[in-house]
């Protein structure tokens, strides 16, 4: 018996079934492609970033690496000094500047419009109990009702302008034999973002409490800034080195250090802890170091998004002492460990544009060159030079 021909309705059903099968197969293939591209069930996708030295500990935290691996990424970073951050950065999947002005420069230089701002930290001053009390006697530092300390940067500039020495401060038994001038210890302004943040707040005060605009640099302002750096001697290139010296060598070596708040908080939480007599002071005014992610590839973009949105990563970021948009975890961390840290920081200034800040730093760099002081050496063996982004 001959097979009966398919009815018109049966033919339509067969074609529809075939179409659905083809679509399911295509979706399955597409799913494999997406999984292979962004990790998922397969091997994590390698992602390379360039960051400042102060952020290396965060990205190398095994918990952070494990969370990225769960999300399909093997994120590896390497440090680079600020003046070289923008140059050659397109060899990586993302870079992470430590200020809005540096991020602006990176994006303009590489034609990138996307930027993430996953975390930030205010700049602080770290000192020791007896030194802080001596500064309080000199009316530069003051203890607040909540137990935190403030540091009057305008009063400090007056003190520094008079070339006051540590041994001249009242009641300072620790530094009574210290012949050095009362100076804040910083990193190298030719390479370091934290030193650039110091320039931001001092230039604001020296410019009659106005953000320095682009254009010609005021010679007197530049000379004052340069002296405050050059009088320190050879500065360290990265922020970790002076923090370790402050922690390990005591008040005689580092009476007063310009640092990231995150450094103090992370050390207090994870160790090695700050010295027993450590005093954290909030400069008035201060500035926030806003750590951004500027992506150059799709995977770099995904890392920036995850750092900003993933709850587990945000919790780990807070444990490293950084502040995110969700303040609850940071507040809980401070309360749990009884840290003398302000959850709310009010006296904050804005950074100049990249052009204005770069002009100030170029003038300071010129002062270093005129003294014959050796150029800084980057972590990757290069020497610093002008014109780069800042981290």
Image (spheres, grey):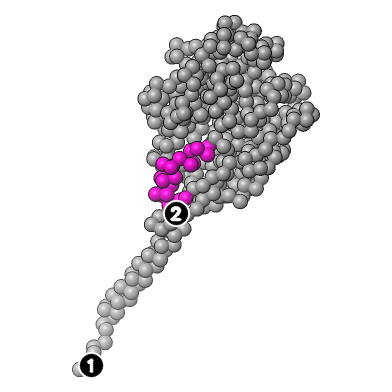
**The N terminus is located in which quarter?**
bottom left
Q: Earlier in the sequence, mark 2 or mark 1?
A: 1
Instruction: Single out the residue that lies furthest toward the right.
Output: 370
- Which residue occupies the foreground of this view, 134 or 136? 134
Horizontally, is 220 left or right of 310 in the view?
A: right
Q: Is residue 15 visible?
A: yes
Which type of secondary structure does the marked residue at label 1 adopt?
Answer: loop
* Residue at point 26%, 82% (across, down): 7
Horizontally, is 172 left or right of 214 in the view?
A: left
Pinpoint residue 385: horizontal percent, then vertical percent: 71, 39
Where 319 falls versus 63 (above or below)?
Answer: above
Pinpoint residue 341: horizontal percent, then vertical percent: 46, 21
Q: How many C-alpha atoms fall within 10 Å of the one at disc 1: few (<14), some, or many (≥20)? A: few
Residue 2 - label = 1
* Residue at point 64%, 33% (across, down): 237
> Where is mark 2, residue-wise?
44
* Residue at point 48%, 12% (across, down): 144
Pinpoint residue 184: horizontal percent, then vertical percent: 62, 20
Magenta region, residue range: 55-74
Horizontally, is 137 left or right of 215 in the view?
A: left
* Residue at point 60%, 36% (across, down): 391
From the image, give the main secondary structure of the stretch colored magenta.
helix
Which type of secondary structure does the marked residue at label 2 adopt?
Answer: loop
């Amino acid at each position: 018996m001959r097979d009966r021909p398919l009815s018109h309705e049966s033919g339509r059903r067969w074609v529809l079934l075939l179409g659905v099968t083809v679509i399911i197969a295509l979706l399955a293939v597409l799913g494999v492609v997406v999984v292979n591209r962004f990790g998922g069930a397969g091997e994590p996708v390698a992602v390379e970033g360039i960051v400042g030295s102060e952020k290396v500990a965060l990205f190398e935290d095994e918990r952070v690496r494990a969370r990225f691996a769960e999300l399909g990424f093997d994120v590896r970073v390497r440090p680079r000094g600020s003046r070289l951050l923008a140059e050659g950065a397109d060899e990586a999947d993302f870079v992470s500047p430590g200020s809005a002005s540096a991020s602006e420069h990176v994006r303009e230089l590489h034609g990138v419009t996307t930027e993430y701002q996953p975390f930030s930290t205010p700049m602080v001053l770290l000192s020791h109990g007896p030194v802080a009390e001596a500064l309080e006697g000199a009316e530069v530092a003051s203890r607040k009702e909540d137990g935190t300390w403030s540091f009057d940067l305008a009063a400090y500039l007056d003190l520094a302008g008079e070339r006051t020495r540590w041994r001249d401060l009242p009641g300072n038994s620790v530094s009574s034999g210290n012949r050095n001038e009362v100076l804040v210890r910083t990193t190298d302004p030719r390479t370091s973002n934290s030193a650039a943040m110091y320039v931001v707040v001092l230039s604001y005060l020296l410019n009659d409490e106005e953000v320095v605009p682009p254009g010609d640099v005021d010679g007197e302002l530049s000379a004052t800034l340069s002296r405050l750096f050059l009088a320190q001697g050879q500065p360290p290139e990265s922020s970790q080195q002076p923090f370790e010296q402050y922690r390990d060598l005591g008040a005689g070596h580092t009476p007063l250090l310009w640092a990231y708040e995150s450094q103090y908080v992370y050390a207090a939480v994870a160790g090695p802890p700050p010295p027993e007599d450590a005093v954290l002071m909030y400069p008035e005014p201060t500035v926030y170091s806003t750590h951004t992610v500027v992506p150059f590839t799709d995977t770099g973009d995904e890392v920036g998004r995850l750092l900003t949105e993933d709850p587990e990563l945000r919790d780990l970021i807070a444990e490293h002492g950084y502040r995110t948009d969700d303040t609850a975890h940071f507040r809980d961390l401070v309360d749990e460990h009884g840290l003398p840290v302000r959850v709310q920081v009010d006296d904050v200034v804005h950074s100049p544009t990249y052009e204005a800040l770069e002009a100030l730093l170029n003038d300071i760099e010129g002062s270093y060159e005129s003294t014959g002081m050796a150029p800084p050496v980057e972590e990757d063996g290069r020497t610093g030079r002008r014109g780069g982004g800042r981290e």
